[in-house]
Amino acid sequence: MSDIIQLLPDSVANQIAAGEVVQRPASAVKELLENAIDAGADKIQLIVKDAGKALIQVIDNGCGMSISDARLCFERHATSKVRKAEDLFAIRTMGFRGEAMASIAAIAQVEMKTKRHEDEVGTLIQIEGSTFIKQEPTGCPNGTSIAVKNLFYNIPARRNFLKSNPAEMRHIIDEFQRVALARPHIAFSLHHDGVEIYRLPASGMKQRIVHLLGNNYNERLIPVEEETTIINLKGFIGKPQFAKKTRGEQFFFVNERFIKDGYLNHAINRAYEELLPDDNFPLYVLFIDIDPAKIDVNVHPTKTEIKYVDEKSIYAIIHSAVKRSLGKFNISPTIDFDQETGFSNMISPIAPEDIVPPSISFNPDFNPFAQSKPASSGSFASRSPVSHAPSAKNWGSLYEVVQHQQPEQASIDLGSSPRDEQFEPVQKQFMQIHNRYIVSQIKSGIMLIDQQAAHERILYERFLLHLEDRKGASQQSLFPQTVTLSANDYELAKGLLDDIKSLGFEVREFGKNTLVIEGIPVDLGSSNINETELFECLIEGFKNSQQELKLDKRDALARSMARNSAIKSGTVLSQQEMNALIEELFACKTPNFSIGGRPVIQTITLAELIQKFEK
């Protein structure tokens, strides 16, 4: 039998290895941006077309490359950052494996122009699928420009698995934000299909966060700073009232490298545990500076995981630093762009010796019982609190309210709605308890309905129907409202516009990262709703549903809309509103369960009630 094991050709091996390094356009963006940073650039441009599928171009003013380096950088494991194995434990650069350029060249058409500051002319190199097409001198500015065209052109299967342009663009923006946040001293810009998404000048850390996430974040940030012999920690955390239901705005950087670490994230969540509900997540942008010899960054292909020598100590430092910053936090808003003034009000401008305790005066001759008069009737409610003991013949007045005839209440006609006979209300009367549950007597006992869960179920099925038939009715707003989103959320909203309009919204694009809301669904027209807040919650809820439950796009949109539009616990309902709510609930396909899987209806049988009162 002949030998069956063979060495793969370089072209095939490169394509296989490229699948680990370049999974989507955002992966190539990350590698190219990090190379530009390692080259010492202080100005970096990112140009993207067709969400990176047609073009990804990174232009920097870094050190550039010589002719031989320009050719060698496309070879696998060719790097300028590691010389020996010991260097892996003293890494300060972003890249070090020497795989990125070779992987990108294996699955795309690459054109690179580079020039060192001391050279008179630069170098042009063109590569297609690991094959060198051209290398010649060229005139170009100092630095490097790399254009990656037609990504995955020679791997159709991988290209077919790419998501829609808005989805891929969101991943690119995520990578761009992570790189730009860590280096506020570098100027960045991002253009997509000829439209400027970001222009970030060199600035301080807080300004960079505000430029990336939005101007309204200036008042949401609390500074964190801690210097120890183990790590130096600095950055910002978010005020508790601005926490969101998704984890998107949580950034950890170790030696300016973005990482994902559930253990350290738990340290921050513990600091917030008494300030936030379980399903809310705080904002944080934290930078850890640590000796490279005490960490190992070479444990994951994407270099987003790190091993620490003393992980427990780092956990304790982060937890205590965040806890202390929250303790100093004052609700006074920030006015100065560069300084958090929320702490200044904690110091009194008055000297301690000038503080005088307040004086209290009272009338020693006051008699609170002097004007008490005997009750004018036998009613318990009209008696004075200090009158003599009530006569025994009046004790029955406590229960007179039971003998009064109940006012006639609205009834419902369930018609042919799908329901069990045991849920048929005997007297078709409803009452609300604690403004949270609706109670009614039924043939077998008592029925209780969670009003918020019931309304969510009704709206969820209604919005799903609108998304299917595309006939959601809209009510025009008297004054259109504008909503400005982050670049990532704006790309998400653009991809959902058709479905959002199907629900009944009238929305159109209006400038950079801005939408105009000209109408809302008729179902919500009678409610006192802030259109801007509703739309922001809709986008946030959609992201949460997709992240946690991996739902279909329309299903996630319907869930988010239902949760944000439903009446909340604590809302007072009239008899007519309770009547309509119950009627629509029993007309639903699944009335017994909420959209989260919790029960909507609970029954207590007469036998269970009797048993509770028996000895």
Image (cartoon, helix red, strand yellow):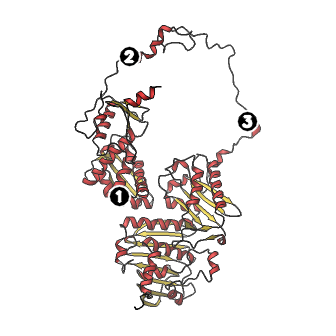
The disc placed on residue 403 is 2
Residue drawn at (32%, 51%), measured in percent from left and top?
505
Q: Quadrant of residue 453?
A: top left
Q: Of helix, strand and loop, which one carries label 2?
A: helix
Q: Residues within 10 Å of mark 3 (few under 14, many from 20)?
A: few
Calculate the distance from the C-alpha at mark 1 to the C-alpha at mark 2.
55 Å
Q: Nearer the viewer, mark 2 or mark 3?
A: 2
**Place of residue 385 in the rendered image (x, y in percent of width and height, measured from the top left):** 55, 15
Point out residue 463 in the picture as x, y percentages from the top left corner.
Answer: 31, 49
* Residue 355, numbered label: 3
Q: Residues within 10 Å of mark 2 (few under 14, many from 20)?
A: few
Marks 1 and 2: CB-CB under 8 Å? Answer: no
**Label 1's element?**
loop
Task: Give the label on residue 552, or none.
Answer: 1
CB under 8 Å between discs 1 and 3: no
| Nearest-to-viewer mark from 1 and 2 | 2
Quadrant position of the N terminus in the picture: bottom left
Q: Nearer the viewer, residue 368 or 362?
A: 368
Q: How many marks?
A: 3
**Residue type of the residue flagged with mark 1:** Asp
Instruction: Judge depth for marks 1 and 3 and give the one in front.
Output: 1
